Image (tube, grey):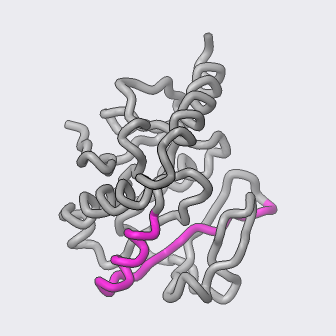
Amino acid sequence: MGTVQEKCALRDKFRRIRREIPQEKRGILAEAAAKHVFELDFYQKSDKILIYVSYRDELSTFPVIRRALLDGKRLFLPRCDPSRRGHMAFYRVCDPVHDLLPGLYGISEPSEGCEPLTEEGGLCIVPGLAFSGDGYRIGYGGGYYDRFLSTFSGTALGYCFTQQIVDSIPREETDKPVHGVATPDGLILPD
């Protein structure tokens, strides 16, 4: 089986695994994973946080979003470019209730009036269907985060349920690793 086929099979497997996590436990698990994010020097020293809006059965990012705003961090969320498949840019969000609108794929995105990210660095919380201990991930197949991470100069941190951690991930030349992964059970930081 080739890398592309392996990734497709793993995507299906981890979507199933994620769906099976009981709804009543999800809030507790999200709070636990977020706590691990807040303990990181990467978080404490960064004045800006780049983060996605969790969607469907992903581990909720709202505890991180809420706390980052309370901590006075500048918060940036992605907006996909519908004219360029696989491309996105980050925009500052000060109030998630008023600054977010349904976007591409039905995922909430910053509205047109939000200020674009124009500076380097920061902490970027990255989604994925599966992460390995060495920081590689399987995303959703659009290449959005791999393209973004190829030029990102800050720290990238995966964020997922513990059940989404695997020993290894098939990878291609364009795949970009993260610097670590936060799960409800703790942090995984590659050597």
Kindly identify the residue that appears in the image at 31 percent across and 50 percent down.
Answer: 184
| Image x and y of residue 102, in percent | 72, 72
Is 184 placed left or right of 18 in the picture?
Answer: left
- In the picture, residue 162 is in which quadrant? top left
| Front-most of residues 143 and 174 | 143
| Front-most of residues 139 and 65 | 65
Residue range corresponding to the magenta coloring: 61-83
Q: Residue furthest right?
A: 83
Is the N terminus in the top left, top right, bottom left or bottom right quadrant? top right
Q: Residue furthest top?
A: 1
| Image x and y of residue 125, in percent | 42, 59
- In the picture, residue 132 is in which quadrant? top left
Kindly identify the residue that appears in the image at 34 percent across and 81 percent down.
Answer: 73
Q: Was residue 72 drawn as part of the magenta stretch in this picture?
A: yes
Is 78 placed left or right of 191 in the picture?
Answer: right
Is the C terminus in the top left, top right, bottom left or bottom right quadrant? top left
Q: How many marks?
A: 0
Kindly identify the residue that appears in the image at 32 percent across and 87 percent down.
Answer: 72
Q: Was residue 11 drawn as part of the magenta stretch in this picture?
A: no
As drawn, 157 above or below 122 = above
| Image x and y of residue 51, in percent | 47, 66
Is 35 placed left or right of 4 in the picture?
Answer: left
Is 5 placed left or right of 172 in the picture?
Answer: right
| Image x and y of residue 31, in percent | 33, 63
Q: Residue furthest front?
A: 24
As drawn, 136 above or below 110 = above
Kindly identify the residue that appears in the image at 26 percent across and 42 percent down.
Answer: 188
| Front-most of residues 92 and 118 | 92
As drawn, 70 above or below 80 = below
